[in-house]
Amino acid sequence: MPNYSALLEKGSLKGKKFGLPRKFFFEVIHQDTQSAVDEAILAIQKMGGIVKEVEVKHIDLQPSMISTVFAECVYLIERYLSEFDPGATIDKYLDQLGPHTKSILSRQKGTPEAKPVPGYAYIKSVRDNRNKMIAGFEEAMVGLDALVFPTTLLPATKIGAEELEIEVQGQKFSTFEALRRNCNPINVIGYPAITVPAGYSEAGLPIGCKWL
């Protein structure tokens, strides 16, 4: 197994360039998360990395775009399930999912109370808005090796806390919404990303830093 710790030496990131997309990803953030990400940025710089602020254009399209991801979920998850359970459907595994995920997927399956994404809205999002967001990320990443930002706007929460409401910098969110907020744009554009440990909150809960 590679010894990744051996790479964490002064100068090991010399010449590498990283962008901080302050708009959206850092606008609303828990103080513990901010502290952990700040320390991660300092660590990058100590290892020789160059860090600069960048802007991701069209990021404001994200709130309306996330519904298109929901529209794709049933197909993509059933395709994944078929790899080990041929013929499997969402319905077979729906009761094993958390309440928020279950609600999203069941709506797309067409339950009596469902309000799935209209076809015209989906097509517009995929052909127009998604491409604008992709172009915004690609422009921001020109000359960079990666974008770096907090995976979630708050530290990890205890299991079962998804239903709770939390206030961050004067704004109220459901815990579920807060945890997925910074991940939504990446889900929309479909780019690969990785989350690495960035530290812990005062309560000892982990905080992640996302690299794109």
Image (cartoon, rainbow, N blue to C red):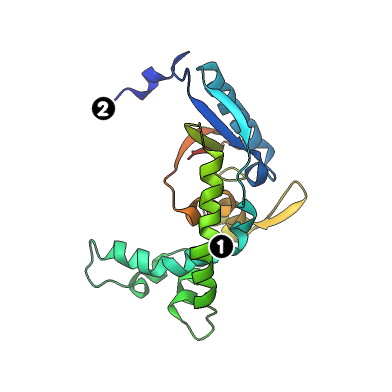
Residues packed near mark 2 inside 10 Å, few (<14), some (14 to 19) or many (20 plus): few
Q: Is residue 76 left or right of residue 180?
A: left
Which residue type carries mark 1?
A: Met
| Separation (CA) of disc 1 from disc 2 | 40 Å
The residue indicated by pointer 2 is 1
User: Residue 133: x, y in percent?
Assistant: 55, 53
Q: Which quarter shows the N terminus?
A: top left
6 or 203, which is in the foreground? 6
Q: Is residue 92 left or right of residue 46?
A: left
Q: Residue at x 41, y 46 (%)?
A: 192
* Any part of residue 128 in sight: yes
User: Residue 203: x, y in percent?
Assistant: 61, 37
Q: Is residue 212 above or below residue 71?
A: above
Q: Secondary structure at mark 2?
A: loop
Could you tell which of marks 1 and 2 lies nearer the N-terminus?
2
Q: Residue at x 65, y 47 (%)?
A: 24
* Any part of residue 158 in sight: no
Q: Secondary structure at mark 1?
A: helix
Which image quadrant is residue 30 in? Answer: top right
177 or 126, which is in the foreground? 126
Q: Is residue 61 above or below residue 24?
A: below
Q: Residue at x 57, y 36 (%)?
A: 204
User: Residue 211: x, y in percent?
Assistant: 48, 37
The label number, if any, that marks residue 65 in the structure image: 1
